[in-house]
Each structure stands twice: as C-alpha cells, then as structure tokens.
Amino acid sequence: MNLTTKQKQYLKGLAHDLKPVVMLGQHGLTEGVLAEIDSALNHHELIKVKVSAADRETKKLIVDAIVRETKAVQVQVMGNVLTLFRPSEEKKIHIPK
C-alpha cells in the first residue's frame, strides 16, 4: 500500500497526540515485540513505536525490518519514534483520496 503526501500529512495529524504503544528495549527487535506491534496495528491501525538504537544505521535497519514484517506503511520517523499505519478489516480510520 502506498500513501500520497496528502494522506501521510493527514495521518501525521492524527498521530500527533498519540503516545508510543510499543517500545523496543535492550533486547532489540524480537518475535514478541513484532507480535505486539502486529496486535496493536490490528486494534488501532495507527500507532507509534519507540525505537532505541545506538546509531542511525541500526535504527534504519530496525525500522525497515518492522515495516517489512508487519506489512505496515511507514508514515513518519521523528527522532526515535516511528509512526506506522495498516488498515484493519474494520476500517477505523478513513484516509482522504
């Protein structure tokens, strides 16, 4: 799923007041963390994930892995916070065309 710039801006506005739902700890990206992200996406559609990494390259690799494994769309990465969107079957968020 690809989002236009307008759609990403809309989702960024919705995500502005959200707090990170999942936080990666010292063990990094594990199966349990991926399962929790997947569950949160099914329930909320739009979530924030706090990614603590030592450097930019590691953070980028972790973000890419999360996006690939969850089949979500990366809306934004700001600092250590990743914003993800994946529509669920119940369509809670209606994004503009």
Image (spheres, grey):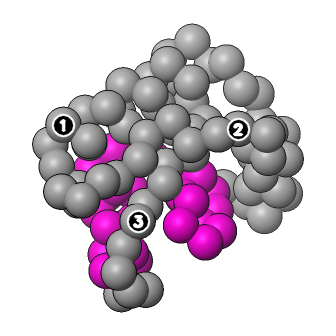
Kind of residue at disc 2: Leu
Distance from disc 1 to disc 2, alpha carbons, whole Å, reads: 22 Å
Kind of residue at disc 3: Ser
The secondary element bearing badge 2 is classed as: loop
Picture layout, residue 65 above or below residue 50? below
Reading the image, the residue beneath label 3 is 52
Mark number for residue 96?
Answer: none
Depth check, front residue: 39 or 69:
39
Distance from disc 3 to disc 1, alpha carbons, whole Å, reads: 16 Å
Picture layout, residue 35 above or below residue 74? above
Tell me residue 46's x, y (percent): 61, 36
Tell me residue 41's x, y (percent): 47, 31
Q: Magenta includes 59? A: yes
Q: At x 76% / y 27%, what residue is drawn?
A: 94
Q: Specify the quadrant of the image occupied by residue 54.
A: bottom left
Kind of residue at disc 1: Gly
- In the image: residue 57, left or right of residue 31: right
**Label 1 packing within 10 angstroms: few (<14), some (14-19), many (20+):** few
Reading the image, the residue beneath label 2 is 18
Range shown magenta: 58-85
